[in-house]
Amino acid sequence: MHAINIKGLKKTYNGTKALKGINMEIAEGEFFGLLGPNGAGKTTTINILTGLVRKDEGETMIFNRDTVNDYRFTRKQVGIAAQEFTQDWFFPLDKLLLFQAGYYGINKKDATDLVESLLERLGLQDKRNARIRQLSGGMKRRFQIAKALVHDPKILILDEPTAGVDVELRHELWEYFSDLHKEGKTILLTTHYIEEAELLCDKVAIIDSGKVISKGSPKELIGKDSVSGITVFLSEVFDDSENVLNSFTYNKEDKRLHFTTQNPENDMPKIISLLSSAGAHIQRIETDKASLEDVFLNLTGKGIN
């Protein structure tokens, strides 16, 4: 059975076509990644699926039930850890989670047990009496995940769940998501950390300009692509890369520049020359076989940030 089934999904905002006929199937128990540059349509797709935005055309199904006609059923099946925080800032965390469980009709005893379990698993026990405004960015992310899971949904949607957190917490969350997957949760992940999708996901869909342009397992997508990667590590952030490197396809992340190329032997000297002439200080350079990041860059011609 498909946990999520999307057919012909279209949405237009003020004359701009945000979605141009999205088709996507996610099997029950699957860990599915949705990748795309900013403005590709990822958030619009999720918002329609969860009832926050109305679609113009198409079908969105949760366990073969329509998300519009059977919204009471479908919303109980889904928990979403959103990027934005829309919580009441004046109540402590444990009370907010209990309120959330009550919204889904969970009795007080079961809700209390669920909340205690989530506070422990996500390392929030010491913060149970804190208010959201008192939390660090990483703790806020943990709370959003706890809130998404408090009614024990079959489907978990993670919208950029590790954005802005430190490396240690990111790896802790990856381990937790893997555990949830092993327990049978269906997980839909959007992320701009391509390593995250490659590590965690059974399948991914790459979306650009409102359309799915490729989908399959990370291994399948990488196997289709004949490109290679060149990664340049700089000693400091280089702000003029867009002007200097506009003839190359690359992704920029702080002091790291990752290039996708079909001819690394030819392109590497050009890249080094351009960067050096522009005053960039190169620490080291690595070349490697195609990764999911290379596939993404080759298909979209854009960075994912």
Image: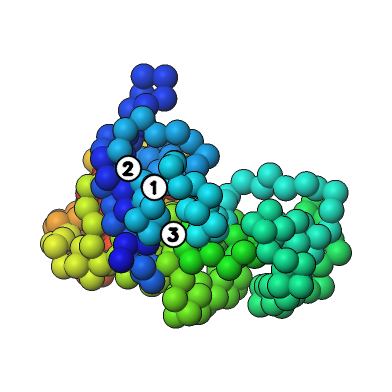
Residue plotted at (55% across, 75% down): 176
Q: Tell me which numbered mark, 2 or 3, is placed earlier along the sequence.
A: 2
Residue 225's place in the image compared with 58, above or below, is: below
The reply to whether residue 139 is visible in this rendering is no
From the image, tell me which residue sits under label 2: 59
Look at label 3 and name its amino acid. Leu
Residue 249's place in the image compared with 104, above or below, is: above
Mark 1 surroundings within 10 Å by alpha-carbon count, few (fewer than 14), some (14 through 19), many (20 or more): some
User: What count of labels does the image hold?
Assistant: 3
262 vs 86, left or right, is left
Give SS at disc 1.
strand
Percent across and percent down for residue 220 are 19, 67
Closest to the observer: 248 or 50?
50
Q: Nearer the viewer, mark 1 or mark 2?
A: 1
Give SS at disc 3.
strand
Circles 1, 2 touching at the beta carbon (< 8 Å)? yes
Look at label 1 and name its amino acid. Asp
From the image, tell me which residue sits under label 1: 66
Percent across and percent down for residue 57 are 32, 33
Closest to the observer: 68 or 148?
68
Give SS at disc 2.
strand
Percent across and percent down for residue 267 are 19, 54
Look at label 2 and name its amino acid. Glu
